[in-house]
Amino acid sequence: MQFYIDHDWQENMATPRAKVGERAKTHLLILLCAIWLCVGLVGHSPWKPFESQSASIIQNLINHPFLSLDSWTNGYWIAPTSAGHPLLETPPLFYWAATGFAHLLSPLLPTHDAARLSVGLWMLLTLIMTGLSGRELWNLGVGRQTNFIFIGCLGLVVSAHTMMPAVAALSGITMAFYALALAKRKPMRAMWLLCTGLLVAFLSGGVVPTLMIVLSVSCLLLLPSIRQQKVASRAMIIGTILALPGIYLWCWLCQQWAPGLWHAWWETQWQVQWPSNHGYFLRTLAWYAWPALPFAMWGIWRFRHSVLTTYRFQLGLIFFGIAFILIGFLSDRSEVSALPLLVPLTVLAAGSIETLKRGAAGALNWFGLILFGILIALAWIGWWAMLNGTPVRFYQRLSYLSGLQTIPFSLLYGAIAVAVTLIWLSIVLRSKHSNRSSATNWAIGMTCAWTVFMSLWLPMIEAARTYQPLFEDLRKHLPAHYNCIHAQNIGASQADLLHYHAGIRLNYHIPSNPTHCNLYLIEDQPGKRHALPGEGWQVIWEGEQTRQNKESFRLLQHR
């Protein structure tokens, strides 16, 4: 059954109007993509390392309202820092948005769940911009394939549901990328999109994503196709210039309200990693960008005679090359740093699917069906094992990793998992193999596997990663009066979560007088207990994180 949609984006952001036939399977995929976007955003506490820092900063902003005198005197809203990370990590746009969501939804949801919903909004914007980029650079219908490939990337799914500034920075990058794709056809609109994308990228991610965009614009201005279209080149230049006042304004405010934090942050933004991390990111892309990477590589080979003269390839390769060089020299070894690389790879891959050899497309299609089929089966087997204790080896392993003896049965989540699994089976049985179906089925498989895992395994994952019960119990054992708490061997992520869950800030500075603070919190290493800091200290609380009993804590009080 087919139906037709008149695109209402005419004269706004899209290519010329056309009637596009959609099959019921595409409708089903749209529904699954919406599920992919929403599932995993709520229902669990902040997880380290990325969410712990974000949760602490958001809680700090909530404790110091925007209009309060204290918030401006100390620069909380201009240069946000967390309890465990005393230095400025990123500009504040993501935290502003997350705090706004927390304020609006806090009566209905816990602070971390409400704040995490802002991630869904940023990812929705990213999906829209990515799809429009593919549609603009190739032709009608390719935008859908662009999004199918994008949400199917193995490295995206976890990051897309994580409360961290990199998600907002990715939205700014995709907006700027779409602006560069649109500049030749709609220069005025591209100018404002580029300006907005630059501001979002800088105010969320800092210098590195901003340099990706600015250097890409500089290289594109050297292309003959752009130089010949003076309107497009002017749009790129003016769009970049229009973003500068907003960038300068935050830098100036940060210098005024938190000069020490700003100078330290600015220096770290330009610290070159040597030896560089290019080898690490190259190895990471082999799985992180799958299946966008093989599709993009095939497209470059298939159109190799026109790669250097066609704008879609020029834009994609220039943006990818600059982003890869920058993250190798200026970013730490983290998979999250590779997120911007997915944008040009996905757009290059989307238009290359139709030219893929039928045998290769079929092999990739079957690989996806088998891979996600196995993952969904493992999710069900693990869930059944935790409920009933069989298979025994499966149960023992999951119980060891999660620290749980059993999990509660949830009718709602069980029904969702059953429905999604049945949908997956129907797709497998009714799938018509074609070049486009290899990307479509991969996206459906990724969506189904993610949904089933988050429906059935979330209690186990939460038990293995949460610190909420531990630190809430610590708070209950605090004495009525104390001046401060020393910290020994406590990581930054644990300090952030302690601040978020218990409202406790640790004192990392150890003065010459060890009794300056009358409480002392120690994290012991597995199989080794640290010696007491001296005489007169008494243990008043002990606790351990559930997973594998590897993290144990002691709270000491000086008598």
Image (tube, rainbow, N blue to C red):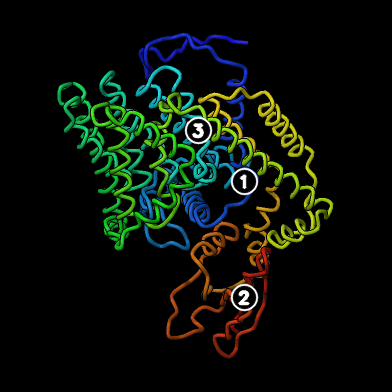
The quadrant of the rendering that contains the C terminus is bottom right
Mark 2–mark 3 CB contact (< 8 Å): no
* Amino acid type, callout 3: Ala
Q: Residue at image x 62%, y 72%?
A: 553
Residue 110: assigned label:
1
Helix or strand or loop: what does disc 3 sit on? helix
First reached walking from the N terminus: tag 1 or tag 2:
1
* Amino acid type, callout 2: Pro
Closer to the camera: disc 1 or disc 2?
A: 2
First reached walking from the N terminus: tag 1 or tag 3:
1
Q: Return the residue found at the far bottom.
A: 535
| Relative to 122, 388 lies left or right | right
Task: State whether residue 31 is above or below residue 524.
Answer: above
Residue 208, percent from left and from top: 31, 48
| Relative to 110, 211 lies left or right | left
Helix or strand or loop: what does disc 1 sit on? loop
Residue 74: assigned label:
none
Helix or strand or loop: what does disc 2 sit on? loop
Q: Which residue is mark 2?
A: 526
Residue 496, percent from left and from top: 52, 60
Closer to the camera: disc 1 or disc 3?
A: 3
- Circle 3: is it few (<14), some (14-19), or many (20+) Cα within 10 Å? few
Of 91 and 417, which appears nearest the observer? 417
Residue 360: assigned label:
3
Q: Residue at image x 47%, y 46%?
A: 288
